[in-house]
Image (spheres, grey):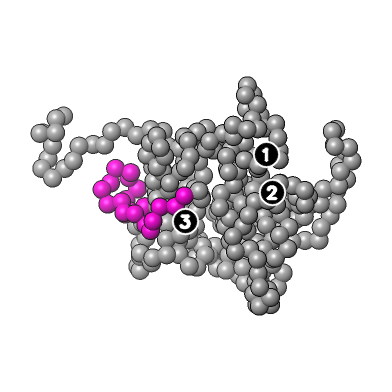
Amino acid sequence: MSEDALTPGCTPCPPVRCDNPFDRVVVSYLLPGGTRVMWQLRDDFLDPQPYEFQLQVGTTASNDADDWADVGTPVLDTYVTVDTEQRLHGIIRWLFYRVKLTTSTGTYFSDPTGLEGTLSRRDWRLAREAVRQELVRMRQDAGQQGYLLKRRVSGTRCPHCLDYQTQEITQISCPYCWGTGFLCGYFFPIDCVWADIHPKAVQIVEHPTSGTVAPIMVQARMVNTWMMSTGDVWVNKVTDDRYYIEKVQNIAERRGIPIVAYVLMRQAPFTDPIYKLPINGQVLSVAEMEGM
């Protein structure tokens, strides 16, 4: 159909878009303080960095709708952003988010995701209350505050430590990718990630090249609303101890949505290059420590 035959006021259909580079987009409306939107790219998405992400909001579940509006300003080198505006005041929640990704070679959009995901309003309220109670317990009793470093699984492959033919990591202490295989290694730290850490246990392991080693393993109870996965790093805000996440086992869910998890973590030795990764604002004053 030609453009002349279109109904007045309509616009031509948009061109066919490239494959969606987003592996998943999660809208977490369980915590107070705004709507948090997180995303993860597919591991086969290799557009050159930097990546610019722009959160958008609309009232339909169609990428072809014309009412998508930007939320805040674009963000770089992160996997999460927050919409601080209260957009709905009634019971019906016709609201969707999507993420616009801009690289030097193209522009991409995620699939629209509803405000409450797969939860009904009743289930969402129950899940939100469970998260609130868990965080209150951690802040008042047993929790330790820290940062979450999300491991990169896509982007520009490291040109310094990857084998040219197999693309395997040859240097786990690479200062360019921190042993992840992708430049920069981790996204910017996410603050206020609490963990109730159980007493540490030393596990003796016979390594074929390193001999007998004794990694310190800990199990932590954590609110699992951060898309935590194996290879991420949790950093204690006060002591700067850094832990690699080895396993995440959900122990409380609501309709398949994770709420609380037991997280098995391996403490990184102090010679590990992960300690060289700076975290702005980590140093606490005595007054701040007394108020925690």
Q: Is residue 87 visible?
A: yes
Magenta-highlighted residues: 56-76
The residue that mark 2 highlights is: 274
Residue type marked 1: Cys
Residue 16 rendering spot, x and y as whole percentages: 31, 32
Residue type marked 2: Ile
In the rendered structure, the answer to whether residue 261 lies left or right of residue 266 reads: left
Mark 2 closeness class: few <14, some 14–19, many ≥20 residues within 10 Å: many
Give the overall secondary structure of the magenta segment: loop
- Which quarter of the rendering shows the N terminus? top left
The residue that mark 3 highlights is: 81
Q: Nearer the viewer, residue 52 or 83?
A: 52
Residue located at (61% from left, 68% from top): 135
In the rendered structure, the answer to whether residue 223 lies left or right of residue 246 reads: left
- Which quarter of the rendering shows the C terminus? bottom right
Residue located at (84% from left, 33% from top): 209
Asked where in the image residue 20 lies, by quadrant, the reply is top left
In the rendered structure, the answer to whether residue 24 lies left or right of residue 109 reads: right
Identify the secondary structure beneath mark 1. Answer: loop
Residue located at (10% from left, 34% from top): 4
The residue that mark 1 highlights is: 174
In the displayed structure, 34 sits above or below 23; it is below
Q: In the displayed orientation, state which residue is furthest to the top.
A: 165
Identify the secondary structure beneath mark 2. Answer: helix
- Is 72 inside the magenta-drawn segment? yes
- Is 262 inside the magenta-drawn segment? no
| First reached walking from the N terminus: tag 3 or tag 2 | 3
Residue 35 rendering spot, x and y as whole percentages: 45, 61
Identify the secondary structure beneath mark 3. Answer: strand
In the displayed structure, 257 sits above or below 20; it is below
